[in-house]
Amino acid sequence: MKLYKLFALLTIFLTLTSCNNKDDVMEIFTGKTWKLTRLTTEGSSNRFLSGLWDNEDSYNNSIEKLNSAGNYIINFYGDSQSAEQIASTFNANGINAKITNGTWKADGVSKELVLSGKVTGAETDPLAKEFMKALLLIYKYEGDNRTLTLYYKDGKIDKIMGFTAQ
């Protein structure tokens, strides 16, 4: 009888504490600035796409601008009735280009993420060009309130952008 009660209590405990496989999208996306840290092909151990820069000076210039405050950032805004789904606005800055009052929609169950908006300004920096292009090609996310990976398709190639919360 004691074994039965112990088993019943253990079953109840495991049922109440099991993972529900739903993300709290409000917690993940909003209330922080996301700074780009990585932009590469999915599965690659490289920090950045190979062949993005023509020479070392171009690479160094991109990294210097990446490290500047206010560049390569995204801010998501929103107020949702559901913790698992949200549709609201975002702002993103490259170096010279930006998206202001773009819209985003995320689903915490399927991990689907869609961003749309109008890019204003133009980029000449290779990393900034790819960053701005990628924002409007995103189809899913992974992450938590500290790190975020956004997946996008460039033709048939899956690529990722990694971010850290600032």
Image (tube, rainbow, N blue to C red):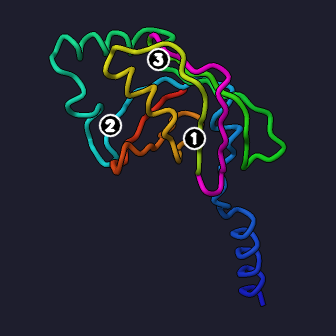
- Marks counted in the figure total 3
Question: What secondary structure characterizes most of the magenta part?
Answer: strand
The residue sitting at 80% across, 47% down in the picture is 82
Label 3 packing within 10 angstroms: few (<14), some (14-19), many (20+): many
In the displayed structure image, the side of residue 22 where residue 80 appears, left or right:
right
Residue 166 in view here: no
Kindly indicate whether the residue at mark 2 contacts the one at mark 1 (C-beta within 8 angstroms): no
| The C terminus sits in image quarter | top right
Q: Which residue is mark 2?
A: 40
- Mark 3 element type: loop
Looking at the picture, does residue 55 appear above or below residue 133? above
Q: Earlier in the sequence, mark 3 or mark 1?
A: 3
The residue sitting at 49% across, 15% down in the picture is 97
Q: Quadrant of residue 10?
A: bottom right
The residue sitting at 44% across, 34% down in the picture is 134
Residue 128 in view here: yes
Closer to us: mark 3 or mark 1?
Answer: 3
Identified by mark 1, the residue type is Asp
Q: Is residue 130 magenta?
A: no
Looking at the picture, does residue 112 appear above or below residue 31? below
- Mark 1 element type: loop
Q: Is residue 109 magenta?
A: yes
Position of residue 28 measured from the top left corner of the image (x, y, whole percent):
63, 38
Q: Which residues are magenta?
A: 96-111
Question: Distance between the Cα atoms at labels 1 and 2?
Answer: 20 Å
Position of residue 93 measured from the top left corner of the image (x, y, whole percent):
52, 17
Q: Which residue is mark 3?
A: 94
In the displayed structure image, the side of residue 80 where residue 26 appears, left or right:
left
Identified by mark 3, the residue type is Gly
Q: Which residue is mark 1?
A: 144
Question: Distance between the Cα atoms at labels 3 and 2?
Answer: 17 Å
